[in-house]
Image (cartoon, rainbow, N blue to C red):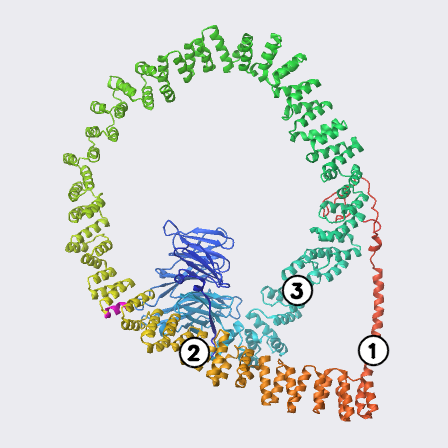
Amino acid sequence: MATPPVNVSEAIQLTSLGINPSMISFTNVTMESEKFICVRETGTANAVVIVDVASPSQPLKRPITADSALMNPEKRIIALKATTAEGDGKDHLQIFNIEQKAKMKSHQMDEPVVFWKWLDATMLGVVTNTSVYHWSMSGDSTPEKVFDRTANLAGSQIISYKASQDMQWFALIGIAPGDASRPALVKGNMQLYSAAQQRSQALEAHGATFGTFHVPGNAKESQIVAFAQKTVNPGDGSVQAKMHIIELGMQPGNTNAFQKCQTELFFPPEFADDFPVSMQISKKYGLIYAVTKAGLLFVNDIETGAAVYRNKISNDPVFIACISEKTGGIYCVNRRGQVILATINESAVVPFVSQQLNNMELALSIAGRASLPGAEALITPRFDALFNSGDFKGAAELAAKYGSLRTMNTIQKFQQAPQQPGSSPPALQYFGACLQMGKLNKIESVELTKLVLRQNKKQLIDQWFAEDKLEASEELGDVISPVDSDMALKLYSKAQSNPKVCAELAKRGDFETLTAYCERVNYTPNYMHMLQSLMMSDPPSAVSLAQRCSKMTPPPLDMQGVADLFLQRNMIREATSLLLDILKDDNEEQAALQTKVLEINLVTYPNVADAILAQGKLSHYDRPRIAQLCEKAGLYGRALQHYTELSDLKRCVSATHAIEPNALVEFFGTLSKEWALECLKELLNANLKQNLQVAVTIAKEYTEQLGVQEIMSLFQERDSNEGLFFYLGALLPTSENKEVHFRYIEAASKVQQIKEVERVTRESNFYDPERVKLFLMEAKLPDARPLINVCDRFEFISDLTTFLYNSNMLRYIEGYVQKVNPKNAPKVVGTLIDLECSEEFIKNLILSVRSLLPVGPLVEEVEKRNRLKMLSEFLEHLVNEGSQDPEVHNALGKMLVDSNNNPEHFLMTNKFYQHAVVGKYCERRDPNLACVAYRLGNCDDELVKCTNVNSMFKVQARYVVSRMEPELWEKVLTDENQYRRQLIDQVVSTALPESKNPEEVSVTVKAFMTAEMPEELIELLEKIVLQTSAFSNNPNLQNLLILTAIKADKTRVMEYVNRLDDFNGPEVGEIAAGNELYEEALAIYKKFNLHVDAMNILIESIEDIERAMEYAERVDTPEVWCQLGKAQLLQGGKEGVKAAIISLIKAKNITTFDDVVEAARKFDEYEAMVPYLLMVRKSLKDPKVDTEIVYAYARTDELSALEDFLSKPNAANLQTVGDRCFEENLLEAAKVLYTSLSNWGALASTLVRLRQFQAAVEAARKANTPKTWKEVCFACVEEEEFRLAQLCGLNIILQADELEALSDFYQQRGNFEELIQLMEAGIGLDRAHMGIFTELGILYAYHKRDKLHEHLKLFSQRINIPKLIRVCEDVHAWDELCFLFVQYDEYDNAAEVMMKHPDAWEHIRFKDVCAKLSNVDVYYKAIKFYLSDHPKELNDLLVVLQSRVDHARVVALMRKLEALALVKPYLVAVQPANLAAVNDAINELAIEEEDFETLRTSIDTYDNCDQISLAVSCEKHELIEFRRIASHIYQRNKRWRQSVALSKRDNLFKDAMECAAKSGERDIAEELLEFFIEEGKKECFAACICTCYDLLKPDYVLEKAWMNGLSEYVMPYMIQVVREYSTKVDELVQDKIDKQNESKQEELNKEKEQMQQNLYAQLMPAALPAPPMGGGDQYGGMGGADQYGGGGGMGDQNGYAPQPQYY
């Protein structure tokens, strides 16, 4: 049987990963590529499971709720779709990055999404009911509409959306219910859309896919669409299935276009209604895969459409599939959870097509397209025939198509072939054909390039290289390199020829690219060789290369050795640069190198060393040594950084002339406090004047470390006020130390820095004012401003005035008052008055300040000293100047009150005085004046207090009423006011009657209400409303009077209601009812004709239904009747409900429909309710009304009225009524309702309860639901109506989930025969499923054993094998059990069953099973089983197991069972494996059988055995051939002496001589020669010296021959010896001449090296003196910023100083 061209395997079983089988469906499972499978689980806990196909054992599960989930084809990115929570049908789309755990983008669609799919790694295709959108994953873009759906897809379920590779063609595919003539065949519809033409075409197709195909001769690949359709022929009803392959976007007039084709898809009869669900194109093989729902796989050729293979790959329905780019196969997922991978068997597909399909052209096409094996025998003869006939073009085209012919041999044939007249050379024809097919291979690329370069057409190579037509290789790069080094470098890199790439980059000096390339490809070149070459030719490049090597991990070179190489060549700059790069990580292990680089530069280039030290990147060098060198080189700053002794530091620190001040300051930061103070003392002691500035700088910088007090003491000890001044001046802005501020003021005063003293006293907040004040008074500075600052800031005004007055510094007093702080003038004036200063000076001082002077404090100060008259002139001046200062006018007012000079006029007319102040002043003198001031200034509290104290309540009442302030009323009407009653009396009797302002009345009334004084308020309102006044008819006041009475005196309410007519009736009535004054409220409502409110009072408050009925009869309005009806409903009772329905009918009220229905239902008054419902139905078209009417008819058993009602249009919810009737056993009514509804399921249930089974079956057939069928079936079984039960059962068992329940029901009642008949009838159904066949098998196993085996054979592919296996085990059906194990691929268990139960054993079947076993131990059990039970068939079995068993174990087993001879054929068959156990067994059998030929062949061919033991055994054998074999074995194991001795013993002299020659041991050869001499075997002697020529010395041979008279026998040997020795002498002479020539050349080379010898050792003594320092700035050499910190002042562009002359 031919090997199938397609391998099918189960890649993953989703259920084994914990995925719920019910979740494996088209809506829950997606597979966008071969990388991921996404399963959406729903239920109690929603989740999304992501299965990585490469490692499926670890699925990723995330708690995600979504309607759909799609994994990106390449990345761990998931797209989710969910319906919005608003329920508007819109879908929300989101894209998440799983690895980054971040949302990338989201969008809410305006319409539902019915299908979506990843078109590529960055684009989603989104399909709605009307349109198709594309949504890019990049940026913030939203879905863009691409095209609208065509009409043929309306009502179709979208199952696929495909896009071409260039995103110019799209195919949308959907399925719809089949035609009426063939409903079981699903109809397929497709929309093909062109983006370039923006046009769609509607087609019939179930599946489609896009691909590309390269037509020979075309520059571009053709875009191909393939689609499959399965349609019904309208004429005869036959089904046609075809696959079409068409080129898209074909250019008009293209004669070399892809030829469209179509082919038939053959579906077996049992798959007549099957259809394709997915189509994929394998670009690797150029094949089209089509997978159907039933699991059929079609494989067709993309070029011709020819069928390659067709087979069923799945027993369960397939719903999704995707291409496997890696294998060129296809993945499918079925409902069982199997992920099936179908791949092309590369070794079998070509033979299958050529032999089984007998299609040579197709076989050659597939083989050439995918370079598959198996076509060589077909291609080579054809090629040879074409080539030999001179058809070079045809031969070239044939060879170009098949990789097996594209070899060097073929190229040479074309190169050597003669050129035919009028045609191009055969080689060019061959290369042209290959270029048309695509890319050239390695050999073709090299040969074509050589040919083109010889013709000077390099531009063609550039074109082919750009088009990727040439395969990169090292050989091709070598050919191109002389012409184009850039292209050669690209070829070397592409071909991964690392040595060539490195050599080319080194030649260019591009070491950055070289290093990056080596790191990328993980290649280590010979850096030392490149470095030494660059040192001679390009030192900077050598440094660059060395630096890059140092950065590698680990470095490929010894970097210290590299540095020595630079130094040996006197390349100090380069060595420094390299060492600094090496030492950048500052490792402790590199301490010696750090010291070395610093020593070299301190001796030769101190400025460079200084720059290196300035970088601070080195820390492990010899610091004492470097410190001494720095001091010698004049780098005192660096020396300070490295010395560790205080004496050394003091010595260097005093050399301030040679140390940069900033460096010196930084150095002090590294010292301890004690050492820093010592060094600072040394600075001051050495030269105080010169070093003061730097000392102050140091003190400023390190104040915190050294301590302020210690530094101040240091300067004070040397009496350096200047030092203190400068130091403390810098510290002052940030210091809060009072001592610091005082010492600074003191030092500034002593150095005559008066301005600084003035500034500090003015600005500082941290000195002790008392101490500073006393110091300044004692210092008696000529300028009093510092003292003025201190006293002014800290309120020492009296002391300042006294000091200045006593010091006769009156001008400073004037200046202070006028310019510094006029606000303190009152205190100055008061102090001057106390000092008895002249009044004239004081007046002038006051007048000089005028408006700047604060009047209030001044008046207060003067008034305390009884000198107020002194201010009269000053105040008059201010008033005349137009001053509006209240203090000025307050003072004038007080003066007028005291003088009684018409003060009331001043109080009434002056607008600038403070009423509260002046009023307070007047209270003791004249309360009326105080009230005037308070009233004008609205001083409420002051006026109330004043009037209360002086019993002026009438004034207070008038003021409060006119003020109209609620806050004021609240204060005076509070319970805490003991004068409240007096005030109320005056308000009622005087203030309010006098008022004509309604607002004053309103505010007053509200105040009384707010104060909760109802009695007083009623008193007030009666006087206003009931008595004749301007406010008698005010509605608000009438309302207020009645409401107040309701609250305070209910007995007056009815009187007020009858007397007043202008109040608000509805509001007042509501309030009265709220206060339980129901009769008053009823009177109010009647007075204002508010009948509804009156009825409410009667019903709800008074609760008198009789009065309510009378009132309703009198009023007779619908509203009143409605209220009465509702009340009667609430009253309840049958009579109440009837009366309520009558009232509601009179009211024509339909709003209480629900309440009426509820009441009627509660009291069973359906008959009375019918008229009401009919009345409601006239006004209200509501399904609830119709529903209640129907139910009322049913309850009253009015079936004729019910049928009449149902025959007319209505909106009743008949289903609900029917269900209620069914539940309440109103079965006849329910039957009428369900019949009207066509609810056949419910009708069937009703008929069952009515025991009308035949009608129930008919209803169940119409309902056609599992639940209904079950109910009717079970009822029929219970009633033993088995014929009807079978009709129902056939529809139940088609539902796999219901089968078990049905079977259990039958079996529990013992109806086994009927159940079997039912199942037998069920397997003949078109929709019969696995469960039916399985259940029938179980029934056969238990009840009809004789039918079981036949059933299993017929339906092995349609049964649940594991389930039947368990059943067969229970019933001991061993033969059937074995058959099931084989069918289920459980071959181990099948073998065990056959070995344990002989009645199940069959040799052929057992062999087939053994060939597929997975448990190795079963093999050996089988061998034992056969040895004991079936020994004749044992070898036949071992042939099958030959490639699966451990042969050594089998040999051991047979040896143990003494059955080796029985399995000799098996041993011979497996001996080529060269196993020791097998070889030993065969050798043992050969000895036993005396078969020496077999033994020798075994030993020579298979050496893996115990050879020494075998030799010993053979040595003792009686046959000489076995002893020769022993000698041969000794030779193979280099036991030469044993072999020679054994051969001599058996007179096998030739064997002995050959063994001695092979041994290579002279002693053995000489011993054998002695043996021949002793035995007198002269011929053997002559033969031996020739055989052992290389081992025997000539002198030894001559000696033996001469002594034993064998000279003539030795002559041939001697001739050979002489010839050999003469040849050796000639070679020695020539060698001597060559060596002399080499010696001369070496001497010449040494002379050249001596001339170029290194001067480094002479120029680098152990300790060179420091080079002389140049004049000027000793730090000027580091004037710029370069690699070492400077460059502007250095000698060359590299940052080094000019070289000394001795360089």
Residue corresponding to mark 3: 498
Residue flagged by tag 3: what amino acid is it? Asn
Nearest to the observer: residue 1475 or residue 962 = 1475
Which comes before the other along the chain, label 2 or label 1? 2
Residue at position x 39%, y 78% from top?
Answer: 1375
Check whether the beta carbons of the residues at disc 3 and disc 2 lie within 8 A of each other: no
Q: Nearer the viewer, mark 3 or mark 1?
A: 1
Mark 2 crowd level (few <14, some 14–19, many ≥20, 10 Å Cα): many
Identify the mark nearer the N-term, 3 or 2: 3
Q: Nearer the viewer, residue 1546 or 1086?
A: 1546
Q: Which residues are magenta?
A: 1282-1290
Amino acid type at circle 1 is Leu
Disc marking residue 1628: 1
Report the disc number at residue 713: none
The residue drawn where x is 45% and y is 7% is 902
> Looking at the picture, which amino acid does disc 2 mark?
Met
Which of 1605 and 337 lies nearest the eye of the viewer? Answer: 1605
Would residue 1208 be counted in the magenta stretch?
no
